Image: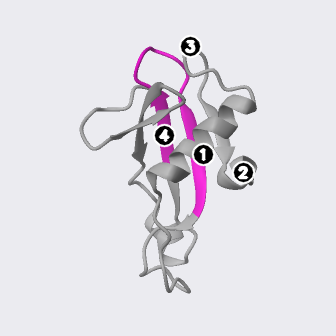
Amino acid sequence: MAIPKKGSRKVTVEGESYRWVVGKRVAFQNADYGLGKFNVAIESIGGAGATLLILAERHMQPGDWGTIEVEPITPSDVSRWISTAIQKGWDPRVDGQTLRFNEAELVESF
């Protein structure tokens, strides 16, 4: 899965450049009941390696039921997820299947 340049953002982690994008599709039923979460796709810019897909445990929009405040996905979040995923075995330069993590699996205190 290649991430399109349009609408994506760049981040550099430990000298390597990555492209990331927040998924925009969520079933309306899930969003209406506060179950809509962000999907974040990340890939290395330098090659055709495996994509990292993160299910972020954050609400999509303030209109979700029970959601008062939205916590945005920031470049520092993405940098932290990339570093942790690499520690857990993700090699962004080696082609392979998409590696999927929940945000909670990649949260570590630094």
Give me the C-alpha separation between circle 2 and circle 3: 29 Å
Give me the C-alpha separation between circle 2 and circle 1: 9 Å
Which circle's residue, 3 or 4, is located before the other in the chain? 4
- Write down the residue under mark 1: 80
SS for dot 4: strand
Q: What is the x, y in percent for residue 47?
A: 44, 14
Give me the C-alpha separation between circle 1 and circle 3: 22 Å
Q: Which mark is residue 54?
A: none
Q: What is the x, y in percent for residue 74?
A: 46, 56
Amino acid carrying mark 3 in the image: Asp
SS for dot 1: helix
Span colored in magenta: 40-57
Residue 103 shown left or right of residue 60 in the figure: right
Which circle's residue, 1 or 3, is located before the other in the chain? 1
Which circle's residue, 1 or 4, is located before the other in the chain? 4
| Residue 35 on the magenta span | no
Q: Residues within 10 Å of mark 3 (few under 14, many from 20)?
A: few
- Please tell me which residue is depicted at 27% across the width and 44% down the height of the picture: 7
| Residue depth check, mark 2 versus mark 1: number of the one nearer the observer | 2
- Where residue 104 sits, quadrant-wise, is bottom right
Amino acid carrying mark 2 in the image: Phe
Instruction: For the residues labelled 2 and 1, say whether their Cβ atoms are less than 8 Å apart.
Output: yes
Instruction: For the residues labelled 1 and 4, say whether their Cβ atoms are less than 8 Å apart.
Output: no
- Write down the residue under mark 3: 95
- Write down the residue under mark 4: 41
Instruction: For the residues labelled 1 and 3, say whether their Cβ atoms are less than 8 Å apart.
Output: no
Q: What is the x, y in percent for residue 5?
A: 27, 33
- Write down the residue under mark 2: 110
